[in-house]
Amino acid sequence: GSQKLSSECTAQKLTNNALSSQLEEKDKTIVKLQSTLKYNEDTMFTERRFHEQGLQKKTENIDRLESLLLQFQQKYDESMIRAEKSKSDFRNQLENIEEAFDEMSIQCALFKREKDSI
């Protein structure tokens, strides 16, 4: 009976050793998977930060372009206002010249009439 018990113990020990060995392999696999997971998380974090920085840069560029466009629009509007004022001033000067010319024509006509009557 003790021989049977001894062989059962030996079989149990072999089974335990095999299970223990399998457990160690599974532990190694878990460590590898955890390491891979950590690497993937780090990589994703780095890529996300890289994309966010790129996005931020693009947003800053768009903001700068919008600001430049606004400045251009303001300068354009100001020069159009100046151009309109210049045109208006020119028209006024032209009217003044025409009035002076009309006045001179009248004076000439009066002078000619006076000269003819002498």
Image: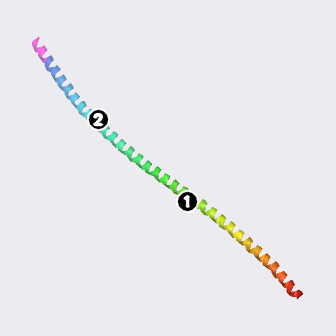
Residue occupying image coordinates x 57% and y 58%: 74
Which residue lies at the image location 49% right of the left edge and 52% below the top edge? Answer: 63
Q: Which amino acid does label 2 sit on?
A: Gln
* SS at badge 2: helix
Image point (69%, 70%), residue name: 90
| Residue 4 located within the stretch drawn in magenta | yes
Q: Does the magenta stretch include residue 84?
A: no
Q: Which residue of the protein is positioned furthest toward the top in this rendering?
A: 1
Q: Between residues 68 and 91, which one lies in front from this camera angle?
A: 91
State the residue position of label 2: 34
Quarter occupied by the N terminus? top left
Q: Name the residue under label 1.
A: 72
| Horizontal side of residue 39 vs 19, given as left or right | right
| Rendering coords of residue 18 (x, y %) | 19, 26
List x then y, in percent, for residue 70: 55, 55
Boundaries of the magenta span:
1-7
Three-letter code, disc 1: Phe
